[in-house]
Each structure stands twice: as structure tokens, then as C-alpha cells.
Amino acid sequence: MTSEAQAPFVRSAAQPPIGLFPKLIFGSRWLQLPLYVGLIVAQAVYVLLFLKELWHLAVHWFDVNEQQIMLTVLGLIDVVMISNLLVMVIVGGYETFVSRLNLRGHPDEPEWLSHVNASVLKIKLAMAIVGISSISLLRTFIEAGNLGTTRSNFTESGVMWQVLIHLTFIVSAIGIAWVDRLADNAHRKEIGHH
């Protein structure tokens, strides 16, 4: 290894050594590692759920009507979107809060990872939650034709609450993006004055 490659790890003589307490605080970020491993296990469970639902659809496609197929496909899309959310949290969270993954130049490096930080991750998660909520709401609307019958899985008030919760997710995502934009503009102005 060259000395240039080691340069980021070499401490200059002017910098005092890091104390025990700061090392402990900084090292505590590794306590999140089991959380990310747990999310990987959760994603594996979602893969199994997806395969089970796909198998059920493939085997029983001739026994169900178009609406039931559409609901099953929306359920599969929902599982995929939740899995995408898990990937964003696992990869982006680990990269942002625990340690670098050093994927630069890897052919499979996600394009969004190069500019991920806590603010970007927060907005991406909010948008993913809105997307997941949209799919669930669409499933509810497809089944809404059965409201008031014994075949219905929903009540009118249940549908209303689902719409209100979805709107709350949308307003929250817009609020998060707006506050982040305000903070970013303030930061740019501050840098511009120096």
C-alpha cells in the first residue's frame, strides 16, 4: 500500500488523540448492526411471502375472477415496494449511520447511494411509504364495491380512515421535503456568506 492510500487514517501530530469517551460514543453506532441484520431477515420473510402468493396465484388462476387476480397482483406489488423500502433502509441507513460500504465503481452500486445522506434517506422513505399506502388504498377501492355485504373486508368508516391516513402520509412527506429544502437553502446561504 502506498502512503497516499493510508493518508486518511494517519493522524497529524497537531491533532490530540481521541479520548476514551468519544471513542465509546462513536463506536456505539455499531450497536445498529443487529438491527440491519434483523431487517435482512425480515426481507427474507417477505421474499418467502411473495413466492407463496405467486405460487398460489399460478396454481389457482383458473378458480378466481379478474378482480381477485388484480387484488393478488396488487398484494405482490405491495410486497415488492415494502422490500424496496427495506433495501433503502438497510443500505442507506448502514451507509449513513454505521460505516461506508465502499461500493464506488462496483457495477451494481445503486445510483441513489452516491448522494444519500440522512435528509435524502428521510425523503425517500417518506415517498416509499406514500407509495405503499397508495397500493393498499387502491386494493381497498377495488374491494369497495362489496361495501355493506358480507363479502366486504371493509366498512365505510374503515375506508374513510384509510383515506385520511393516506392523506396524512402525503402531507407528512410534503412537509418533510419542504423543511429539508428550507434547511438546504439556509445552509447554501450560510456557505455563500463565508
Image (tube, grey):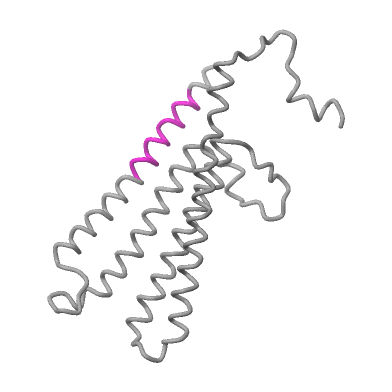
For residue 79, above or below residue 185: below
Q: Residues in magenta? A: 174-189
For residue 150, above or below residue 139: below
- The x and y percentages for residue 25 are 53, 23
| 8 magenta-colored | no
Name the residue located 37 percent from the left edge and 35 percent from the top edge.
179
In the picture, measured across the screen, residue 128 lies left or right of residue 154, that is right
- The x and y percentages for residue 11 are 73, 17
- Which residue is most to the right? 2
Name the residue located 66 percent from the left edge and 9 percent from the top edge.
16
Name the residue located 50 percent from the left edge and 72 percent from the top edge.
51
For residue 123, above or below residue 159: above
Image quarter where the N terminus lies is top right
In the picture, measured across the screen, residue 28 lies left or right of residue 166, that is right
- Which residue is most to the bottom? 62
Image label count: 0
| 181 magenta-colored | yes
- The x and y percentages for residue 26 are 56, 25
- The x and y percentages for residue 150 are 15, 79
Name the residue located 41 percent from the left edge and 87 percent from the top edge.
60
Which one is in front, 186 or 124?
Answer: 124
